[in-house]
Amino acid sequence: MINFIHLIFFQLKKNHFVIISIFLLFTLGFTEEPSKTPFKNKLNTKKTVIKGKVHNWPTDTVYFATFTFHSPYSTSEGFQVLTSDKTFEYTFDQVDKPFIIFLTPERKFLDLRNDVLFENLTDKYYRGYCQKFYDYPITTYLIEPGTETKVELTKTKRYGKTQIKFLNDNTYNSEYYQTTFELDAGLEEVLDSKFDSTLKDLRNIDNAIKNLNNKLNELSTKLDKEQKYISPFLYKYTKSEIEFGAKKEFLRYLLLDHKEEISEIFRDEIPEKINNVIEFNKGKVDYATMIGQEYNEFLELYLTFKFSKLKNKLISYKDFDKEKFDFALKELPKASKYYYLANNLLHINYNEKTKELVTRLIGLYPDGKLNDRLLEKYN
């Protein structure tokens, strides 16, 4: 994404890596109750702009950062000093794809968007779950080409939530994006034994699948009712978030909540009903899916599941090595192979074995957008 965003009013530079909880970026702003009007494509302008006015802002600057779930090392950042009347305006040039950005009043919080895929990665397992943080001053937006996003931001306290009021055309579309951050919470709930006590026992896996499918259908039906009020891209994006949010939460239910029982199942053939929930059409991973949170969190858990099937035992955590490199090349969708491997190689510590993997990856993808970053680290 960094290749197609050029910023007029602010400085750019690539960022280094810091651990963060993804949910942090999404629960921190809250919006006023939206009013529905049908989405109007004709309102789109030639320029892609985000602008606004701030209240109770703790600094004289608005910082921003692009945010790419599929490639956290492809992000860029910038800033603009507020005018005397506390307003700002960012203009993006040569934008041909939607992208996600967040705004913050303090430079130190820009680094929080890096490592978005690794904040749950431990030396024992991958949680694939985002804890809720409410004490960081960040607001997040989906920006589409040729649109103007106009906001009024009010800080209640320095590290608390930021109130967002949208003043642009197609206001409901902007506000609806803010609701997508909570989709996985509803999917997680229906797989919780507090919601259904029978789920304490994995022998009742049919109940878990039924609960999940019911919730999936409920969310999909609600989304379909919103279709005429939101942009075609946001509709596709949200549809993907629902689909892969369900798969992710189901894998968490199996791999984390029922480790002992699923370990037994891996010794035998995995029931088809489980595979049917987890598997997906790898040839239909589009851009709207690629930039989403749920799909990219799902991938690591998906590889854990597939690798455990291969080994006939639960492998809760697999270090990134040649075996995992080759396995990811084999199992991941074509659209995700390069970014998954490149970002892992940029994340882990340098050693000669990983340097060999970098050489292999660049040989396979000579035009890869992160190749320069890889060469910088490993040469």
Image (cartoon, rainbow, N blue to C red):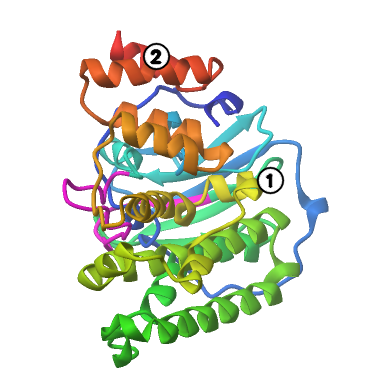
Question: Residue 147's mark?
Answer: 1
The quadrant where residue 326 appears: top left
- Residue 73 in the image, given as x and y percentages of width and height: 40, 30
Query: Residues under labels 1 and 2: Cα distance?
Result: 40 Å
- Residue 368 in the image, given as x and y percentages of width and height: 52, 21
The quadrant where residue 113 appears: top left
Residue at image x 35%, y 58%? Answer: 23
Along the viewing direction, whichever of 303 and 347 lies nearer the viewer: 303
The residue to which callout 2 is attached is: 359
Amino acid carrying mark 2 in the image: Thr
- Residue 307 in the image, given as x and y percentages of width and height: 35, 49
Describe residue 274's horizontal placement relative to residue 106 as left or right.
right
Mark 2 residue crowding within 10 angstroms, few (<14) / some (14–19) / many (20+): some
Residue 7 part of the magenta segment: no
- Residue 346 in the image, given as x and y percentages of width and height: 32, 27
Amino acid carrying mark 1 in the image: Thr
State whether the magenta stretch is mostly helix, strand or loop: loop
Along the viewing direction, whichever of 50 and 203 lies nearer the viewer: 203
Q: Residue furthest top?
A: 379
Inspect this view and state whether residue 81 appears: no
Residue at image x 60%, y 33%? Answer: 91
Q: Which residue range is magenta in the image?
A: 118-141
In the picture, the quarter occupied by the N terminus is top right
Residue at image x 64%, y 66%? Answer: 172
Residue at image x 31%, y 50%? Answer: 311
Mark earlier in primary sequence (1, 2) = 1
Q: Which residue lies furthest to the bottom in this view?
A: 197
Residue 122 part of the magenta segment: yes
Q: Is residue 333 above or below residue 56?
A: above
